Structure formats: structure tokens, C-alpha cells
Image (cartoon, rainbow, N blue to C red):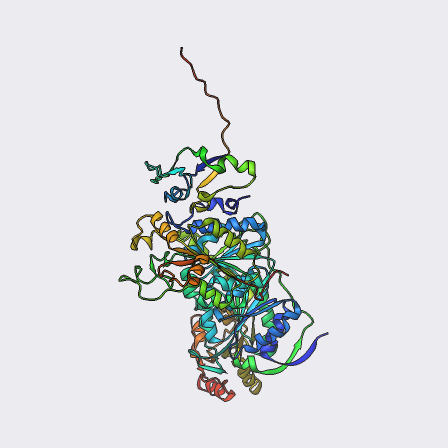
Amino acid sequence: MTRTEFWQGNTACAEGALAAGCNFFGGYPITPSTEVAELMAAKMPKKGGVFIQMEDEIASMASIIGAAWTGARSMTATSGPGFSLMMENIGYAVMTETPCVVVNVQRGGPSTGQPTMAAQGDMMQVRFGSQGDYAIIALCPASVQEMYELTAKAFNLADQYRVPVFLMADEIVGHMREKIIIPDSMAKTPRKALVKGTLPFKPDADLVPGFPQFGKGYGVHVTGLTHDERGYPCTTNPKLHEALVRRLVDKIESARHAIADFDIINPDARQVFIAYGAPVRTVQQVMHDRPDKNIGFLRLRTVWPFPEYALAEFKNAKCFLMPELNLGQMAREVERHVRVPVVNIQKLGGELHTPAELVAALEAHR
Amino acid sequence: MTFDDWYRQDRLPHIFCAGCGNGTIINCTLAAVDQMGWKKDDTVFVSGIGCSSRAPGYIVTDSLHTTHGRAIAFATGVKMANPDLNVVVFTGDGDLAAIGGNHFIHACRRNIDLTVVCMNNQIYGMTGGQGSPTTPRGCFSTTTPTGCVEMPFDLCELAIAAGANYVSRWTSYHVKELEKAVKVGLETPGFSFIEALVQCPTAFGRRNKFRQVADHVEYLRAHSLLKAKRDRLIEAGEAVPDDMFVVGELARRKRPALGVKP
Amino acid sequence: MILAIDETRCKGCNLCTKVCPYKIFKEGKKPNRRGIVVPELDRPERCTNCRLQQLYGRTLCGVCQLTCPDQAINWIEEQPYELKKVAIEY
């Protein structure tokens, strides 16, 4: 039996994680994501999992990576300033192909910025923040229901592709209370185990190697240094390094169609909104107020890897309108893929766009 | 079975310089681990970045070579998620005391069931000999070309003050004592910290009048003051020599511990 | 059992010459193929561990092995002792 609740986004996130079988949470308090950690602290031990409050975000990211290697489904939650601290170990998780989930309830930046106001200022940092070339998966929820569902989905994606998966929520979605329908159970993708006797970092056909869990007799050496298929450091071989980094990127980029999650509304429209996260709600309001076949909407749930092929669905598009709570971070990515103008409707300060602002942009670029 | 069985034979010889004491400390640690009768499948070695932290790569068990200073934070995750695993952390003075200082004191405070072996060579060896938080006053390094003017850290005192259950210090000369100390550390529930002073002929000895490896080891031997002897000196009201460091078991207690195997 | 230095691992630091209580290890004189001066063994049959470790069933001293930073010192099985024919000339 499904049940209905009236929950905050952060509550839904924690509940979604528990429903997905999350059994390790390493956290550090930071507004506006603290509720996730609070709920995990209360509920995790009852479900046989482990909650630990670490000394900083660097350590909480480190602890979830360590826990992931023992087979746990591990997760942490943070906001912008903590996310910056995590960058070091996020790079480590990418290099060592550690499945884990990081929730970032974004707030106004740079630096400490606006702790209780929303922003989408970490969209570039999540993709490019750590050093070197890599690829990750980032999901953006726009409602409390999606907070629940995408958190659970993030664990499956992490286990399937052995990569840190990011839930890039924002303060509005995190602190908003709304109705949520809770499904009976969530689909769970098991982590593909390493076949005994094969090399621990030798990829299968999908470019993802099997997972050699600690304590199971694999005797695997995990290192953030450039490593060969045995897992041993091999830092001065240019070909090996290139092959490794290309594989780490390709395993995500080549699966972009399988990972992508988006809705297309009115594909024949001339003016097309593109939105992710909280601005989706304003666009939905505008679409509701003006039922017009000439206003299209690309509604993204997967932001990275960016599903650029979805843009080609809008064949008649004369311009793309992109409301974002930043100075155009994803708009730049859209611009790379289209030939028509991309109008970035920027908003800083922590409040959502009003429908009137979007309508004004529609009128201005008709 | 001897400690040699714990090495990945296909990876030896290791990358440490000739005369580096790190290999000695790994021998002693593995000898202690071997005596514990632990299975290789149930043992995990974790390390950060630096010379000392290359150690787990030479050991056959599951091992995690992590980011600079974060070894203890990673080890906390491993131990908390699966308390059945025996987790040993290799770290160095720069890794533990400088960039990882916060993780170190908090692991001591939590008293999590880890054994941390710190190879203190008093210098950043892998980057070519920069001054570290434990470089003694007056010693030369590439970043202290006129002699170090800062006071060094006493890592053992720090661990005791922060709440570790077992703390001891030995040097690379005292191999048998070190082996026993690591074994006691492995047996002790809660956080065990073993500091091992090691010679670094390439980065430290070369700049500090230890031309030969043996000279540096001899210095470590001659300047180590047994804890019992220090206590006797204090009792007799005599002065403890400034240039000596205390070796021996410095703390053993039974504070409540975290992550102990149920 | 007999004491042996693995020349493929030894880096010639000569720490073994310092720690052995019987002074079995002596500084070498000639560099080997890798350019490393490997210590020489001076009458290794004096080593207590060589003689007694099988009798006692445990490592007796072993300080050289523990100290060797390069894991180059070990005890290996002795080759079967071959009787030498000595021609006695009258």
C-alpha cells in the first residue's frame, strides 16, 4: 500500500535514502541540509545502519568512501561551503570508482553567502570542481516527491556505474513542505561484484569493473594514484594514464542515454524553457497560466551528463529560455549545443523567479 | 607464517630510498599483525599520502591509499561500516600532524578501534625534504634553510591529551620493542597510537650531519630516554635532558571505545 | 637453515652490519650488477637463528630481518651437504 505524507524536502531525501537501503551516513551539520543528517541520526541505527557525525566535511566524504568499500550504501549531505571542502575526496572517489551519494542542498554563495536562501551556484563545481578530467552524475529534484525518488535513484546509479552521484537540490526544495506519495518499495540495482581471479580494475564491456568489496578476500589495493588494472600505482606511463582517465569519463558519457531523465513538453514550440531544480516550478506555473502550443519545456532531472540530444527534439525552436538561480552556469552548456539564441534568465538573492519575470522574458524574445 | 608472507612479493623491492627506516617499521607492524593470527581477508590497511603511506601498496590485504592527511577519516568509515574488519593505519608526521591533525585528534577523542602507526621522519620526504610539524628546533630542511625556528609537535602527548587508549613511542632501532608495542596496540580496544621515529637519510640526514644511515640510527638510539628512566629522574628531582625524547609505553587505559567488534 | 641476503632487494644501506649481535654482516667491497654494494656474510653458521629456529620452532633473534628496510634478509633451506673428497697424499 502506498501512503501519503506531508513532508519537507530534506525529510523526503533521508527517507528515500533509507528506502533505497542506505546503511552508512557520515555527516556534518550545515544549513540548509542539516535535517537530512538529523533524521538519519534518529532512524539509521534502528535500521541496522551506521550514522556518524564527522569532524568536518572532508572527513565525512572520506568516511562514506571508506564505508562504500566495505559494501555499504553510503551517503552524506551538505551545502555549498561543505561541498567545496569535499572536492578533494570527490576526486578520489572518481579515481577509485567508489559508489557513493552526495546530497548538496545548495545555498547562496560564494563563501558562506546566504545560509537560508536558495541558489544553484554549484552546478559547475559539481562537474568540474575537483582537479583533473572526470565525469560524474548529477540529479536535480524540483519537488519533495522527486527528493525521495531521485535520492533512491542516485544509489542505483552509483552502484551501476561506480561513480559518486550528486543530488543537487536547493534550499527551496529542501525546506519546502508538500504532499508526497510513498511507494511500497524502491527498485534496487545490485552492485556488480568482481569475478574472483580477474584483475580488480579491468573493466567489463560497459567500461565498469566489478566491485571488489573489502573483507571478501580480493586483496585489492585501492589508490588515488594512476593505477593499472591490478590496482597498483603506475604514475609515469603516459598511455596508461590517458587510457584510465578516458575510461573514467567514457563510462559515464557513453551511458548518457541510459542515465538521462527529462520531460519534453510541446516539442514543436517556438520558444522553449529549459529548467532544473526549483525554477521548474515557476515554469510550470507559467505553462499552466498560458496554455500555448508555442511554449515548450525541457524539464531536466539529470543535469550531468548533460543530455544534449534532448535539445534536438525541439526542431522549431527559435530561442531557449533558461531560468536559473545563478549567473548562467548551465546556460553556457546549452549554448554549446544549439545554434539559436539562449536567453539566460538569471536570478540571484535566494528567491525564485516570479511567473511575471518569465512571462516578460517570453514577450521580450518573441 | 612470518611477516614476509604479508608482502606482495611481486611489488618488492619498494620505492623507499636506501637506508629509509619505513621498511623497518612495516616489518615490525606486519610481524605484530602476523602474531595476532588475523586472517588476511579480515585485515585492511589504510594510509594517506607521503613516503610512509606507500606501505599498504606492498601488503597483500585489502588496502586503501587515500588523500593527504585523510587516512584516519577513511579508516573511520571502514571500521564503522564493518567492525569485523581489523583496520591498521600507516601514516607519517606531515600526513598526521599537519594536514590531518584535526582527523587525528578527533579519532583519539572518539577512541575508535583503530591502530595508527606513525612513521615520524621529522621531514616531508616524498616532496624532497621540507620542514614538517615535528622537525626539531634548529634542524635544517629546504624550507628551513637557516634552521627550524618553530617548536615541534609531541605527537604522543597530543594523542594522550586527546584521549587515545594506547600510546607508545619507539624508534627504528628498537625493532623488538616496536613489534611488541604494535601488538599491544592491535590488542587494545579503542584508539592505539604508535609513533616510530625513523631515519630519513635522503631528506633529513643529508642536511643534518648524519652522513651515514648508521649515524642517524645511532643518534635515535642514543637520544631515546626510556620512560621508566625519565620517571626515575623526575622522582629524584634531577633534570631531564632537553635533547632526548621519551620512548616506551606512554599511556594504556580503558576509556569507552567506538567501533569495537561486538 | 642458512642466512641469505636477497641481492635483488638489498639496497646496500648496511643497517644489518650495525644491528647483528654477532657481527655476521660485514660491509661489502664490490658493487654487484645493479651497482649496489651488498654486505657480505662472515661465518653465517654463527647465527643462533640459523642453528636453532627449527629446534625451538620460533624465530630466536631475527633483529636483522626485522631491521632490514628492504626485506632482503631471510633464512633459506640449506642445500644438502655434499661430502668433499679429500685426496690424502702420503
Query: In the rendering, at what x and y percent does residue A319 appear?
Result: 46, 78
In the rendered image, the vertical position of residue C16 relative to residue A50, given as above or below? above
Who is closer to the viewer here, B223 or C73?
B223
Q: How many marks can you see? A: 0
Q: Quadrant of residue A35?
A: bottom right
Residue at the left extreme? B146
Residue at the top extreme? C90
Residue at the right extreme? A1
In the rendered image, the vertical position of residue B73 relative to residue A287, given as above or below? above
Identify the residue at image location x=48%, y=49%: B176
Relative to A331, is B78 on the left or the right? right
Which of the image's four quarters has the N terminus of chain B?
top right
Is residue B118 at least partly visible in the picture? no
Which of the image's four quarters has the C terminus of chain B?
bottom right
Query: In the rendering, at what x and y percent does residue A265 appear?
Result: 56, 77
Query: In the rendering, at what x and y percent does residue B60 appear?
Result: 52, 49
Who is closer to the viewer here, B73 or A24?
B73
Who is closer to the viewer here, A248 or A112?
A112
Residue at the bottom extreme? A356
Q: Quadrant of residue C15?
A: top left
In the rendered image, the vertical position of residue A207 relative to residue A18, given as above or below? above
Is residue B152 at least partly visible in the picture? yes
Identify the residue at image location x=49%, y=38%: C49
Query: In the rendering, at what x and y percent does residue B160 appear?
Result: 48, 65
Who is closer to the viewer here, A213 or C31?
C31
